[in-house]
Image: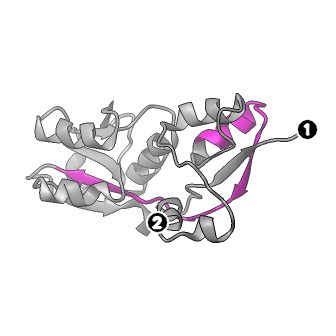
Amino acid sequence: MPMLAASKFGFYQQEGLRPELILMRPNISVTAVVTGQVEFATAHGSIVRAAAQGMPVKSLMVVADRPAYYLVSKAGVNSVSALRGRSVGIASLGGSVHLMTKEFMAQNNLDADKNVALVVTGDHNTSIQAIQNGHVDAAVISVPWQTVAEKAGLRKLAYFGDVMRLPMANSQRHRLS
């Protein structure tokens, strides 16, 4: 969101910059940075994992220190504890959202490997549809998709930023050698 706001309000142009903002999945953005197709990305978790695996990337800036994700559910699921024995949609396995969801469940006395079925539902739009179609009981979606979810009749169960700290939306740059 900060990158979009900076573009909308002309902050980049005031500094003599003309960025092209491109929406990409985190794993694709890492590949694009490493191969030189783009110079920067904002997928912090994916970049950190890539750097840990020896990829030539580094983090330059932290934009937020709390995850901007909501846990939303279908009608009838009124609390996090009510997810015991139910399914929760997440974007992908092994990514930041997956790890945050497991930690969030643990903070709520649920073991995400035993008490809750984590199901890959893809992007935020398909996650909302997965709840509506009865494929999952809840899903983790980012800001501003919680507004779309509420308009669709879904319930906000929790905001991850209220209970955990995790650097999000960092800018990264291909390491210059």
Rendered residue at 48%/59% (across/down): 67
The residue closer to the viewer here, 173 or 95, is 173
Label 2: element kind: helix
Residue pushed farthest right?
177
- Where residue 40 appears, as percent x and y from the top left, is 66, 46
Amino acid type indicated by mark 2: Lys
Colour treatment of the image: one colour
Q: Which residue is mark 1?
A: 177
Within 10 Å of the Cα at label 1, are there few (<14), some (14-19), or many (20+) other Cα atoms? few
The residue closer to the viewer here, 83 or 57, is 57
Range of magenta residues: 46-73
Q: Which residue is mark 2?
A: 8
Query: Which is more N-terminal, label 1 or label 2?
Result: 2
Rendered residue at 12%/53% (across/down): 152
Label 1: element kind: loop
- Where residue 4 appears, as percent x and y from the top left, is 48, 60
How many numbered marks, from 0 up?
A: 2
Rendered residue at 53%/60% (across/down): 3
Left or right position of 73 against 25: left
Q: Is residue 125 visible?
A: yes
Left or right position of 138 against 47: left
- Where residue 150 appears, as percent x and y from the top left, is 17, 59
Amino acid type indicated by mark 1: Ser
Spatial distance from mark 2 to mark 1, Cα to Cα? Answer: 33 Å
Vertical comparison of 43 with 114: above or below: below
